[in-house]
Amino acid sequence: MAQTTLHNPVDVVDFLTAQHERIKTLFDETLLAAGAEREESFVRLRRLLAVHETAEEEIVHPRAARELDNGRDLIKARLAEEKQAKTALSELENVDVDSEFFTEKLRELRDDVTEHAGHEERDEFAGLRAELDDTELQLLERAVKLAESIAPTRPHAGVEGALANVFVGPFASMVDRARDAILGYES
């Protein structure tokens, strides 16, 4: 179904693109900070990346795989990028945030995530906007928000795709959110 020429300013594409911008800002804030401020910024970044990717994997990618020409191959590539990012993010969780290693790896991750977001925006989101009408895009946005509200707050490499998230996600989310509460991270 073709998209009308004007779209509602709040739909799944706008919502996820705005999150991409927030993620880029958090990378910059984390890289510029030090000590406790850097740790707090990294926790916010890690949390947003985790819930954002989970929602894309559960809601957006499956729809894009069905709707877009070459959608399955496109999504396969995005999932591989997401797995790589989750692995890198997990490795950073146990590294001193003020170390040179952390800074170097965070810069590499920022570059990879920025490239990944560009692929999504150009190939996946633009395609969805062309194929879906305003109502469908708005419903997807609501589904993404719901998925994010119950998503794990830490990266879980190897849990990419809708099916893996359905089976592992609820348990991982419960453990992550309990851990966050114990450590005093905001929910």
Image (cartoon, helix red, strand yellow):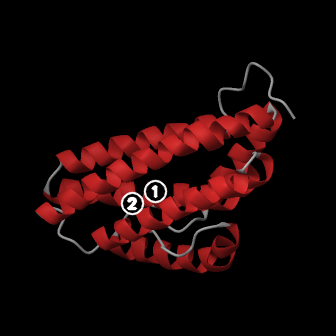
Residue drawn 72% across and 40% down?
Answer: 128
Rounded to the nearest whole Å, what is the CA distance between mark 1 and mark 2?
5 Å
Q: Amino acid at mark 1?
A: Leu
Residue drawn 33% across and 50% down?
Answer: 110
Q: Secondary structure at mark 2?
A: helix
Q: Position of residue 144 (x, y in %)?
A: 66, 51
In this orientation, does residue 91 appear? yes
Q: Residue furthest top?
A: 5
Residue drawn 26% across and 75% down?
Answer: 94
Q: Position of residue 155 (x, y in %)?
A: 45, 68
Quadrant of the image containing the N terminus: top right
Q: Amino acid at mark 2?
A: Arg
Q: Callout 1: few (<14), some (14-19), or many (20+) C-alpha neighbours within 10 Å?
A: many
Q: In the drawing, does residue 6 fall left or right of residue 124?
A: right
Q: Position of residue 53 (x, y in %)?
A: 54, 58
Q: Which residue position holds label 2?
A: 46
Q: Which residue position holds label 1?
A: 49
Residue drawn 54% across and 77% down?
Answer: 172
Tell me if label 1 and label 2 are in contact, CB under 8 Å: yes
